[in-house]
Image (cartoon, rainbow, N blue to C red):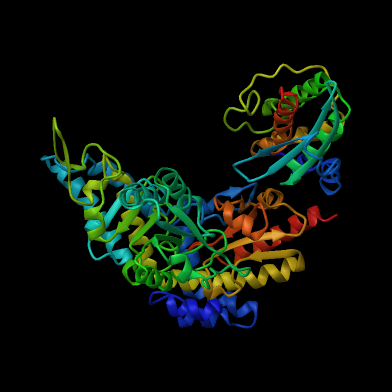
Amino acid sequence: MDGVTDLSDDLPPGLGSTDAATAAAQPSVAPLARQAGDVLDVAAIRRDFPILDKEINGKRLVFLDSAASAQKPRAVVEAMAAFAETDYANIHRGVYALAERATGRYEAARAAVARFIGAPSADEVIFTKNATEGLNLVAQSWGRANLGPGDAVVLTQMEHHSHIVPWFQLQAEKGFEIRWIPVTPDGHLDLSELDRLLDGARLVALTAMSNVLGTLTPVRQIADAAHAAGALVSVDACQFVPHLPTDVVAMGADFAAFSGHKMVGPTGIGVLWAHAALLDAMPPFLGGGGMILTVDLEGFTPDAAPAKFEAGTPPIIEAIGLHAAIDYLDGLGMENVRAHEVSLTAYALRALTERVGDRLTIHGPSEPAARGGVLSLAVDDVHPHDLAQVMDEHAVCVRPGHHCAKPLMKVLGCGATARASFYVYNDTDDVDALAEALADAADFFAS
Amino acid sequence: MPGLEDLYREIILDHYRSPRNRGELAVPPATKTEGFNPLCGDEIVVYVTVEDGTVTDIRIAGQGCSISQSSASMMSAAVKGKTLAEVDDLTRAFKAMMSIHESALGGTPEGDSTGDPDGEIIDAPDVKLGDLEALQGVVKFPVRIKCATLSWNTLAQAIADATAPA
């Protein structure tokens, strides 16, 4: 399929914007470099991230692993510290003023998340430990209550293990069928058999953006088809929410999960969003304090969502940090974040190919507007671990390995890739350093 | 800090580019044993034939980085034709080399790196390691130690498989 045109048509408003598409179509590197520098003031952004001033091996740190976890701006660190120093107490049910203040700040963070992802109500936002817990919640709560023999769950071959393993775990108990949407050689989803795959399906689990290939998937198109077939849609939005304007309703999702730490927020907090009607009907996942209406010697009655799904003391300080991260990204503007990454990716695709040459393979869609700023790199006859080891000498941080997507690696016919990923604080200097380090690594191992 | 020349000795790159005993053996009489490094996805497949207490043939398959593949290649050359007792000595000597405390090598300790990466205390036998000593520099790069030991751990399992009562 023609990924670019189709994807642009199928994505929510704001994606694949005209500016970004124009930037991607520029004929040479120099105009792209200017474009990449124009959208965001990266020099000013870099000053917000103290770690980027640090040197590694006496060299400028080139951090290109934000798809694994993003660095934290001073605003996030300071918001968490200030909250802990002035407003901290456990939330809910405290009658003293401090507990009330802490509860207010925690719920304000929930409201900020809802606004940021276009959720109709803050009560639809569940705070979890991370995206993995959110996706497990979908399987263990909704899946356990709704799936059995004769049902089918449809996954894509480009899912992260966190959107695969929970369904295998439940399948062992419930005996439903698991089907796979294949991946084409150019890194898109192959939807040619979608109708057949959806026949009898109860749920489709798909990533909005591949953490290996950077592919932006046509979530809305698949969701429309899934809904027409009577199936729900669980979206792994980990790589999407930090990088593109998000509207979970326009996307057609029924569930969407993401992590705070990939969007300049802290570790230890993630989000699961789901439609209120679904959450109302779902049984609780974890039991404990905070999730009940009442408990007696006969049993318990769960509270309503979101409390129903937040057993135990939640990540309170982390929620304050996530709120600050959302404010930071809002300050930049998610449209600008996306445009910056499209132009930087376009620059990188060209610069890396020019510098490293025919030895280089960049997995995934070749068109910047069809992808996020994640580049899975391979150099002929050099293993990604060895590439990354040599690149570390240049203080260039890339991640080698299977990226928790072994089924996709098998489809790609490789055991691993070296992945470079971009975010708001990366610029063309980082890309140039990446190209230089990659070329050096390729030369080092050339026989 | 340790340099790349400590890690990528020429003999390591030679074994990586021209691996010894690469291929498969018919199963049976040989046994086939797979080893995985779940962190990085490296895979080693060891085919081994044990006759009368001696490793009479060995082949290596799988894929992975230069350290894991060259280590497997060197291992195959070192153990072929050796008795099981000699293989055991080599294995313990190699794993002891991989467990030398980094401070002794002038590297930067990261976490608890004393002892074998798998947590065993190694009593090193007095055995000549030959080419395998080229892998000593790997110890200075703690995340790569498991790349070097993967083939030896897989061999130990392979010999257990090959000598298990039918």
Q: Is residue B107 left or right of residue A125?
A: right
> Foreground residue, B39 or B48?
B48
Q: Percent from the top left, x then y, of residue A59?
A: 64, 52
Q: Percent from the top left, x then y, of residue A5?
A: 51, 81
Residue drawn at 54 percent across, 64 percent down: A214
Image vertical order of residue B44 relative to residue A182, above or below: above
Query: Which image quarter holds the C terminus of chain A?
Result: bottom right
Q: Percent from the top left, x then y, of residue A286?
A: 29, 41
Image vertical order of residue A237 relative to residue A218, above or below: above
- Which quarter of the figure has residue B34? top right
Q: Does any portion of residue B19 appear in the rendered image?
A: yes
* Residue lying farthest to the right in this orientation: B81
* Residue lying farthest to the left in this orientation: A95
Q: Is residue A296 left or right of residue B42?
A: left
Q: Is residue A178 left or right of residue B108?
A: left
Query: Which image quarter holds the N terminus of chain A?
Result: bottom right
Q: Is residue A119 left or right of residue B38?
A: left
> Foreground residue, A328 or B25?
B25
Q: Percent from the top left, x then y, of residue A36?
A: 54, 73
Q: Does any portion of residue A79 appear in the rendered image?
A: no
Residue drawn at 67 percent across, 36 percent down: B146
- Which quarter of the figure has residue B59? top right
State the count of labels. Answer: 0
Image vertical order of residue A126 relative to residue A32, above or below: above
